């Protein structure tokens, strides 16, 4: 049984557990897998761990909570963030939600291996829900064990913080701890299961409410709970939408859905900008706040391939491939619209909001590509064709997406008589096999560079100013798949140094960092088909 113990080093945390205070709870206090009706959550305690060990923590996230480095390096912190102890005001619970998985309604899903410790109220008034991922069974675990392993936990911890520093809306990671326990996993689903080191990530977010949180209640006809959850969400996370009267009306729900559509569109534009592929864009993995949530089989484009997905479960139909993410987000929003329809009983404003998603994404995508290319503004008559021609060229041969856009800033666009060699030389490091480029491809790419250079010269901007703008949106460093795997391999051998080093590098992804240049290198050949570097398997055995 998890014990409640006062921990002086963390007593500065102030908890305001409004989610469980204002929403209906599961009356069954026993922790056994079941269908939970008429409730937004179930009370449940984390599973005690055998020998917890702090692996890493985020200084930035700790600072947001008002915690010092000394606090985070204390034994108290390790005990709490591994689920062994609870602070007096913590009231742990798991959330109930449903969702569409790979386009099919899956019914009740819920926090199968995540346990919320409570909501911290920071000094600036921001609420942060602290959540342990991998902390044991909950009523929503179905046939899984509720635990997590080191490899998936390293990936989630590092990527959460890397995305934050890239300027992409995301859940955060406060800490990564080893549990001292082992967890049985069949990584390749081939019958060769083995014991892996267990781990827990403490995640943080203003809210972990998802699209599926609303779907489950509409699907069950529990419309009173649907309204309670929607009203809570608006009052807690969208207070700017409340009318002066303070009373939530039909128009409030419409404005709220419009805002969710806008935030989601902006998020997907960010993903496309840096080549991030979520891998599991089920409706239960879509945040109502428009932030990246649930880092499962995610991945980053090495070479630009619009058809790539990191998820082995999705490799046949590629539903969640890079190029499909904007459309899937819209499809998911449609499911959310269906879920909240009983609050509005009018399809037209919901359809208008979905159209707003399309318009917001299209405008954001154009502005994003203008920034990536160093254009001062988007000119539809010329720039749409310029971008489409470029993307076609990038997809024809293996071209590292991150390196290409970073190197593009160095093309001497001011020179109006560039030879083919002059056009391509600054970009040579972006191609995985530059010597194999055909003469025809070189010619077509050089022709594009000349058109691009001509377009850049129209803006009449200094080279230095343009390069600064391009470098501010085209990262030098991303959490490349093979880098994460290298960190995992070292960590599983007891060496956590690469986790810390990557965490430090990813704090400044747009800076040059000359002494960290090797972390910007394109994927090595050994990583082309290595598990964890090319495609990923889920670390949780779930049915």
Image (cartoon, rainbow, N blue to C red):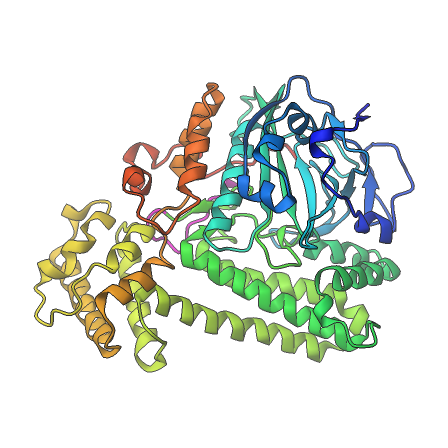
x then y, percent, for residue 381: 33, 82
Q: What residue lies at 29% left-to-right and 55% top-to-bottom?
A: 406
Which is more toward the observer, 275 or 310? 275
Left or right, 183 with respect to 217, comes to left
Q: Quadrant of residue 146?
A: top right
Q: The C terminus appears in which quarter of the rendering?
A: top right
Which is more toward the observer, 140 or 429? 429
x then y, percent, for residue 266: 53, 64
x then y, percent, for residue 46: 75, 30
x then y, percent, for residue 178: 59, 24
Task: Point out the residue furthest to the bottom here.
Answer: 381
Task: Point out the residue furthest to the right here.
Answer: 27
Q: What residue lies at 75% left-to-right and 59% top-to-bottom?
A: 236
Is residue 311 shown in magenta? Answer: yes
Predominant secondary structure in magenta?
Answer: loop
Q: The N terminus appears in which quarter of the rendering?
A: top right
Which is more toward the observer, 260 or 224? 260
Is residue 324 shown in magenta? Answer: no
Q: What residue lies at 51% left-to-right and 44% top-to-bottom?
A: 161
Q: Is residue 371 visible?
A: yes
- Image: 164 above or below 263: above
Q: How many marks?
A: 0
Q: Is residue 294 visible?
A: no
- Image: 30 above or below 162: above
- Image: 84 above or below 433: above
What is the span of residues highlighted in magenta in the rendered image?
302-313
- Image: 110 above or below 73: below
Q: What residue lies at 50% left-to-right and 43% top-to-bottom?
A: 159
Left or right, 512 with respect to 506, comes to left
């Amino acid at each position: 049984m998890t014990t409640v113990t006062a921990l002086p080093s963390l007593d500065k945390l102030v908890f305001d557990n409004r989610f469980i205070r204002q929403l209906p709870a599961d009356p069954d206090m026993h922790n056994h897998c079941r269908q939970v009706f008429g409730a937004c959550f179930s009370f449940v305690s984390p599973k005690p761990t055998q020998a917890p060990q702090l692996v890493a923590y985020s200084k930035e996230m700790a600072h947001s909570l008002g915690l010092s480095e000394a606090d985070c390096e204390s034994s108290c912190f390790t005990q709490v963030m591994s689920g062994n102890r609870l602070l007096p005001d913590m009231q742990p619970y798991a959330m109930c939600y449903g969702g569409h998985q790979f386009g099919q309604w899956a019914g009740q899903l819920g926090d199968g291996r995540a346990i919320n410790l409570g909501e911290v109220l920071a000094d600036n008034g921001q609420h942060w829900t602290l959540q342990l991922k991998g902390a044991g069974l909950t009523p929503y675990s179905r046939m899984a064990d509720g635990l997590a392993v080191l490899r998936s936990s390293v990936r989630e911890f590092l990527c959460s913080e890397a995305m934050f520093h890239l300027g992409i809306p995301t859940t955060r990671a406060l800490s990564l701890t080893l549990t001292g326990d082992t967890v049985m996993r069949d990584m390749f689903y081939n019958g060769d299961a083995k014991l892996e080191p267990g781990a827990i990530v403490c995640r943080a977010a203003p809210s972990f409410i998802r699209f599926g949180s609303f779907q489950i209640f509409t699907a069950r006809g529990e419309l009173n709970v649907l309204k309670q959850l929607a009203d809570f969400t608006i009052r807690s996370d969208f207070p700017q939408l409340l009318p002066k009267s303070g009373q939530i009306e039909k128009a409030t729900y419409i404005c709220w859905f419009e805002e969710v559509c806008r935030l989601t569109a902006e998020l997907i534009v960010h993903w496309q900008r840096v080549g991030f592929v979520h891998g599991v864009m089920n409706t239960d993995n879509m945040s109502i706040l428009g932030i990246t949530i649930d880092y499962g089989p995610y991945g980053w484009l090495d070479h630009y391939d619009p058809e790539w997905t990191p998820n082995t479960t999705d490799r046949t139909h590629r539903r969640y491939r890079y190029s499909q993410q904007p459309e899937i987000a819209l499809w998911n929003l449609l499911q959310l619209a269906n879920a909240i329809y009983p609050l509005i009983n009018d399809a037209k404003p919901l359809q208008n909001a979905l159209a707003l998603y399309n318009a917001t994404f299209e405008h954001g995508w154009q502005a994003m590509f203008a920034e990536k290319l160093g254009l001062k503004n988007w000119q539809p008559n010329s720039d749409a064709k310029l971008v489409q021609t470029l993307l076609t060229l990038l997809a024809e041969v293996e071209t590292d997406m991150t390196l290409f856009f970073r190197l593009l800033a160095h093309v001497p666009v001011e020179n109006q008589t560039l030879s083919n060699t002059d056009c391509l030389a600054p970009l040579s490091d972006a191609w995985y096999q530059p010597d194999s480029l055909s003469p025809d491809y070189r010619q077509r790419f050089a022709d594009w560079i000349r058109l691009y250079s001509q377009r850049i010269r129209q803006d009449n901007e200094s080279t230095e100013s343009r390069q600064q703008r391009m470098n501010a949106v085209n990262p030098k460093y991303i959490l490349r798949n093979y880098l994460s795997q290298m960190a995992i391999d070292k960590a599983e051998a007891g060496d956590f140094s690469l986790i810390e080093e990557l965490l430090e590098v990813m704090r400044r992804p747009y800076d040059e960092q000359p002494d960290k240049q090797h972390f910007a290198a394109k994927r090595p050949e050994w990583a082309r088909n290595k598990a964890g570097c090319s495609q990923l398997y889920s670390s949780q055995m779930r049915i």
